Amino acid sequence: MVKLQFRKIRIRYKRKVYEYDRILLIFPIKSHQLLLALRGKELKIAVTKQGKAYNISIKENENE
């Protein structure tokens, strides 16, 4: 099971405050060894919804 973590980021710049949302996808420790091969690479992510299920696909970008 993975965990989604939502954060609101606030940055001050020239007397203004800019806000944006950040979403983190946290994988269980068991899958870390498998995912280390993707570290530092540019990835493509696709999210689809089928009924009550969400599918997240991650693959390497072929343009590198």
Image (tube, rainbow, N blue to C red):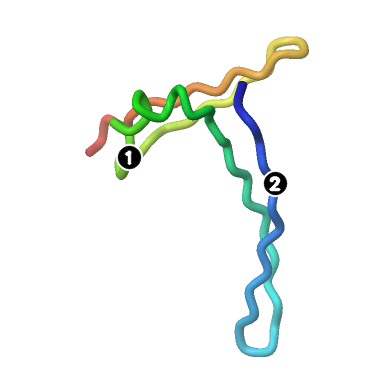
- Disc number placed over residue 19 in the picture, else none: none
N-terminal label among 2 and 1 = 2
Q: Quadrant of the N terminus?
A: top right
Quadrant of residue 16 within the rendered picture: bottom right
Q: Residue 30 in the image: x percent, y percent?
A: 46, 23
Q: Quadrant of the C terminus?
A: top left
Image-based side of 11 in relation to 62, left or right? right
Q: Callout 1: few (<14), some (14-19), or many (20+) C-alpha neighbours within 10 Å? A: few
Q: Nearer the viewer, residue 4 or 14?
A: 4
The image shows residue 14, relative to residue 49, as above or below, that is below
Residue drawn 55% across the image and 23% down it: 56
Residue placed most toward the observer, 37 or 14: 37
Secondary-structure class at tag 1 = loop
Above or below: residue 40 compared with residue 60: below
Task: Single out the residue that lies furthest toward the front.
Answer: 29
Measured as percent of width and height from the top left, residue 52 is found at 77, 13
Q: Which residue is denoted by mark 1 in the rendering?
A: 39
Crowding at label 2, few (<14), some or many (≥20) Cα neighbours within 10 Å? Answer: few
Q: For the residue marked with disc 1, what is the amino acid?
A: Arg
Q: Position of residue 11 (x, y in %)?
A: 63, 73
What x and y, as percent, mark residue 2? 60, 27
Report if the CB atoms under discs 2 and 1 are less than 8 Å apart: no
Residue extending farthest to the top is 51
What residue do we see at 48% from left, 31% from top?
45
Seen in the image, is 59 located left or right of residue 37? Answer: right
Q: Which residue is mark 2?
A: 6
